[in-house]
Image: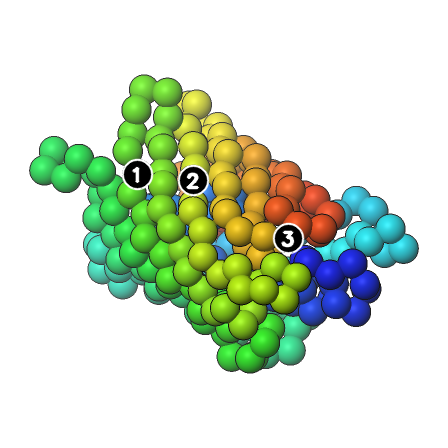
């Protein structure tokens, strides 16, 4: 959702980066859910500031639609444009932190695309999260397609998910999140978002990857419908 130095191999790796995005932090999934019977539209872009001769690139724009199927379940589809076989799917089941449940929990799946060798990351994951005065801590583990999530050709398809995030006020939110492995999912992202009203926010982020891929900036427009 990066490993080869040769341009042709890097192109294939970049295609392998594409993932369908459930309710997320900057890069990682979260224990949050889309409100039941409502839709969420996301428009995400990832790009470097370098030219193609220096290894720069821009990933296809991700148009994502998530629907709250029930208070505990969300489903979603992402359309990557321009991209062959652009449809990629995700789903999540989650329970919030409460007086009877000391941590929020979530299990889900993302990256279930229709193009073998490019969009079928087929990732499943589990997460827990806990709110503290200094912010929310999330931790989990993911596992995906060993044929696609690799490091220099070797299987590298499972790793940890770690996140800290905090709402500074009713407008500003900040986050640091990490995903293990040297596959296309392995990364460290920093970001913040600003909420313009109750339904619309924009996120700005910067990420480095655990392999040879160039760091990317991301802009993510989020609209609740």
Q: Quadrant of residue 11?
A: bottom right
Q: Is residue 63 left or right of residue 95?
A: right
Front position in the image: 138 or 79? 138
Q: Of all residues shown, which one is farthest toward the top? A: 133
Front position in the image: 184 or 94? 184
Q: Which residue is mark 2?
A: 162
Which residue appears at 90% of the width and 55% of the height? Answer: 53
Which residue appears at 58% of the width and 57% of the height? Answer: 183
Q: Is residue 94 visible?
A: yes
Q: Secondary structure at mark 2?
A: strand
Q: Of all residues shown, which one is farthest toward the front? A: 154
Residue 197 screen position, x and y as percent: 45, 37
In the drawing, what numbered circle is on residue 169? Answer: none
Query: Are circles 2 and 3 on residues that touch, CB within 8 Å?
Result: no
User: Separation of disc 2 and disc 3 at Cα?
Assistant: 22 Å
Q: Secondary structure at mark 1?
A: strand
Q: Secondary structure at mark 3?
A: strand
Query: Are circles 1 and 3 on residues that touch, CB within 8 Å?
Result: no
Q: Quadrant of the N terminus?
A: bottom right
Q: Which residue is mark 3?
A: 45
Q: Is residue 66 left or right of residue 215?
A: left
User: Separation of disc 1 and disc 2 at Cα?
Assistant: 10 Å
Q: Residues within 10 Å of mark 3 (few under 14, many from 20)?
A: some
């Amino acid at each position: 959702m990066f490993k080869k130095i040769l341009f042709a191999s890097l192109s294939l790796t970049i295609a392998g980066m594409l993932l369908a995005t459930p309710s997320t932090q900057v890069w990682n999934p979260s224990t949050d859910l889309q409100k039941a019977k409502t839709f969420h539209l996301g428009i995400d872009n990832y790009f470097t500031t370098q030219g193609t001769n220096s290894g720069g690139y821009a990933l296809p724009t991700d148009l994502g639609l998530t629907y709250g199927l029930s208070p505990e379940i969300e489903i979603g589809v992402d359309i990557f444009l321009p991209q062959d076989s652009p449809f990629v799917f995700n789903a999540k089941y989650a329970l919030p932190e409460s007086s009877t449940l000391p941590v929020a929990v979530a299990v889900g799946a993302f990256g279930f695309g229709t193009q073998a060798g490019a969009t079928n990351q087929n990732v499943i994951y589990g997460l827990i999260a806990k709110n503290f005065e200094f912010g929310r801590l999330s931790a989990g583990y993911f596992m995906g397609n060993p044929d696609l999530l690799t490091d220099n050709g070797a299987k590298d398809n499972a790793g940890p998910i770690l996140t800290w995030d905090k709402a500074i006020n009713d407008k500003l939110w900040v986050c640091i999140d990490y995903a293990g492995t040297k596959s296309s999912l392995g990364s460290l992202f920093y970001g913040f978002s600003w909420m313009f009203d109750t339904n619309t926010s924009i996120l700005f982020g910067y990420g480095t990857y655990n392999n040879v891929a160039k760091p990317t900036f991301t802009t993510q427009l989020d609209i609740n419908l």
